[in-house]
Image (cartoon, coloured by chain):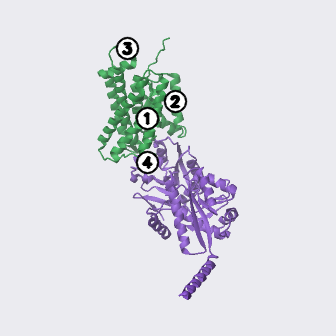
Amino acid sequence: MKKLIALLLALALSLTVFAAFAEEDVITLKIAHIGPTTGAAALYGLATQHGAEIAADEINAAGGKYRIELICEDDEHNVEKVINAYNAALDAGAQMILGSTTSKPCEAAGAQGYTDRVFFLTPSASSTAVIEDKDNVFQVCFTDPNQGSASAEYIAAHQLGTKVAVIYNNADVYSTGIRDTFVEKGAELGLEIVSEETFTDETTDFTVQVGKAQEAGAEIVFLPMYYTPASLILKTAADKNYSPIFFGVDGMDGILSVEGFDTSLAEGVMLLTPFVATSEDEKVQNFVAKYQEKFNETPIQFAADAYDGMYILVAAAEKAGITSDMAPEEACDLLIAAMLEIEVEGLTGTMTWDESGAVTKTPMAATIVNGVYVFED
Amino acid sequence: MIFLDHLINGLSLGSIYAIIALGYTMVYGIAKMLNFAHGDVIMIGAYIAFCGLQYWGIPPVLAILLAMVFCTLLGVTIEGFAYRPLRQATSLAVLITAIGMSYLLQNIALMIWGANPNFFPTTFINGSNIRLGTLNISSATLFTIAANVIIMVTLTLFTSRTKLGKAMRCVSEDRGAAELMGINVNRTISLTFAIGSALAAIAGVLLCSSYPILQPTTGSMPGIKAFTAAVFGGIGSIPGAMLGGILLGVIEIFGKAYISTELGDAIVFAVLIIVLLVKPAGLLGKPMREKV
């Protein structure tokens, strides 16, 4: 009996030695997800956290060279709390940050990370201020104004029409920023802006703006704005029996969930979006299935951005040669250099980055058909 | 044709301003106070009608009636609790109370219905659009203009022919003398609030039928514009509110269409300043001589 135990012990010992041997080749990346998982913006923070978890599970289960140790911190969509979350993440040993989910907190934490030399990849914080004057912050999503040039590219590439009307909110940087890059890129690509009208946050009457687009014979009406004014524009156009192609950006996302909205008004509306859960793409379906199984809900764009973000971090870490025990300050500059060289194919497109931290990817647009988003291609 | 199109849009917008302005002008004319909460009563009325149509599934006419009844009670309650105790106070105190009431109503709506915009169901009013050549008139527009005319005629008849209406005019002219003649001033003022608030419910439904985004701040901007319209037409005068509202709507649309959408609101207020410089009492206002 003693012999047997001794044998078993010896066997167990040799197994651990063997296992430790294999572990030496495996690199564990400590990645912190920071996002609002409670509070008013929790919808977005939970989505990115869940997306990141699914990617981490996949990477760990695949048994490749990398393992992910995911650290999750809550910033409550608050510019002060995000600094606590960031410090907590570093204390927990984070080497790089996937976050923050929303723009204002990301701007604050990214600036702190710039001083401390910590690498940030935000899945979904889209304002320019997030990456401005900070070499350590990169984005998975388009920077707000770049949605304008991306929309122009999409419209030109898919030959949706050449006569374009633009209606934008001139009291809002999001709207004017997108409008500026759209007009600039549109001119390059031969889109003719036949009418350009403005409104402000208080505007409820769009009869003039829509009337002018109609009078000018616009085939496409570009709407760089949030869905609230957009829904009024769609209603006004329906009253006027005017049915061009309405083309929106990510602010349009959500129009179908407005309480009481007559979805027939949005029929045929196109919007620039990198991810649609109903897409037939195999990778997307795989992701959606796993997400639904684990969290019992359909992933939104934010979840897909974070899922891609996790794979981007692994790709960058591989390129940069990050090791398990590398300090965040050391990893930061290596990762920045690596980001400029990698190309990652994710759910939201094939992505490359430049020094500004902004992403370049092929714009994709969905069309609303029978009250759901459908990809054209 | 596009000119006619703009004109009709202007008339439609102006009619909504006019109905809201009637509420301001009646209360000002009779109670001599600026009820800045009027715009928010409109918003509450629209929400009640929205709930009726969207959640409770009651017929449109009933939903509008329900909104009118609710707003009438709300208006009378506001007057009784917030304004009546201040009847002898300075006008500034009443004004600040009205502004406070406006924020109170907005925040209550925020608590009940949340900040997310709702889309007002417009299908009941948008039966069929009328097409004349290339001209398109939405049924909401026709409905608004018609409602406006009916309301103005009824109100004018009410104030000139009925006993209660005459009492209102008396209170408006001289509150002290009216009281001496046996008119119940408090009741007359309550009645004014009741009528004004019932009109607010109609205005809310019409406003949201044309511009169907409904949120707790829905009433503020139209409220301010309508107040401007009431001053423009001569505050205190019923036909003045009507004229002021319609002119304001037409000027706003034409300003946007032929000058610049960026300057639309600036043009409206510039016209107001010019009119007030030339006619300080407004277009149809009675100039008041201060006796020293």
Q: Which mark is residue B177?
A: 3
Q: Name the residue under label 2.
A: B271
Label 4 marks a residue whose chain is A
Q: Where is residue A353 in the image (x, y as percent from the top left)?
A: 63, 62
The chain whose colour is purple is A
* Neighbour tally class for label 2: few under 14, some 14-19, many 20 plus, Cα within 10 Å: some
User: Closer to the N terminus: mark 2 or mark 1?
Assistant: 1
Q: Identify the subunit bearing mark 1.
A: B
The subunit letter for the residue under badge 2 reads B
Q: Which residue is disc 1 drawn over?
A: B39
* Residue at which label 4 appears: A237
Q: Where does the image place residue B229, in percent across and percent down from the top left?
A: 45, 30
For the point 36% across and 20% down, the residue is B185
> Disc 2 versus disc 1: distance between alpha carbons?
22 Å
> Could you tell me how far apart the alpha carbons at marks 3 and 2 are, in whole angstroms?
37 Å
Q: What residue type is labelled 2?
A: Val
The earlier-in-sequence mark between 3 and 2 is 3
Using the image, tell me which numbered label, if any, was put on residue B108: none
Rate crowding at label 1 as few (under 14), some (14 to 19) or many (20 or more) other CA atoms within 10 Å.
many
Labels 1 and 4 positioned on one and the same chain:
no
Q: Which residue is drawn at 62% across and 79% down?
A: A22
Specify the farthest residue to the front.
Answer: A2
Residue A310 or residue B213, whichever sits in front: A310
Which residue is nearer to you in this view: B266 or A334? A334
